[in-house]
Image: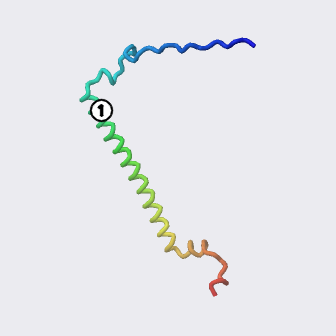
Amino acid sequence: MAKKKKNTPVPRPAATDAPATLKDLLSREVLDKLKAQSDALKAEEQGKKDAVLKAAEDKRKAEQKRLENDFGHLLENSNQDWSKFK
């Protein structure tokens, strides 16, 4: 059997050797403003989603209530086995 060679780990460059990112170049105040604006936009988007879901739920409830008051719909969808109610 042949001996296996051990792999030597390749040294990684230090974090200071990495190129500067936009986050590093912007000041702390600008970053805070951008984060606040991002949070506000996310909250606004979530509010819109909630409003759409609530409108759909209200529409569904209104349709259900209308169908509960419609005698033809109730007659078509009722159980036809009347003998158990005697």
Residue type pointed to by label 1: Leu
* Relative to 33, residue 27 above or below: above
Q: Is residue 60 left or right of residue 47?
A: right
- Which residue appears farthest toward the right when viewing the image? 1
- Front position in the image: 63 or 32: 32
Residue 29: x percent and y percent? 24, 29
Residue on which disc 1 sits? 34
Relative height, residue 28 to residue 17 (above, below): below
Residue at x 65% of width, y 77% of height? 80
Q: How is the image coloured?
A: rainbow
User: Which residue shows up at 31% across the image and 34% down it?
Assistant: 35
The single residue placed furthest to the bottom in the displayed view is 86
Q: How many marks?
A: 1
- Pick whichever, 45 or 30, lies toward us: 30
Residue 9 lies, in percent from the top left, at 54, 15
The residue lying toward the viewer, choosing from 9 and 72, is: 9
Mark 1 element type: helix
* Residue 17, above or below 52: above
Q: Is residue 83 left or right of residue 57?
A: right
In the rendering, at what x and y percent does residue 16 appear?
37, 15
Q: Quadrant of the N terminus?
A: top right
Going by the image, does 44 lie left or right of 12?
left
| Label 1 Cα neighbours within 10 Å, binned few <14 / some 14-19 / many ≥20 | few
Q: Position of residue 30 (x, y in %)?
A: 26, 28
Residue at x-position 45% and y-position 56%: 56
Q: Quadrant of residue 44?
A: top left
Q: Nearer the viewer, residue 62 or 57?
A: 57
In the visual, does 71 lie left or right of 1?
left
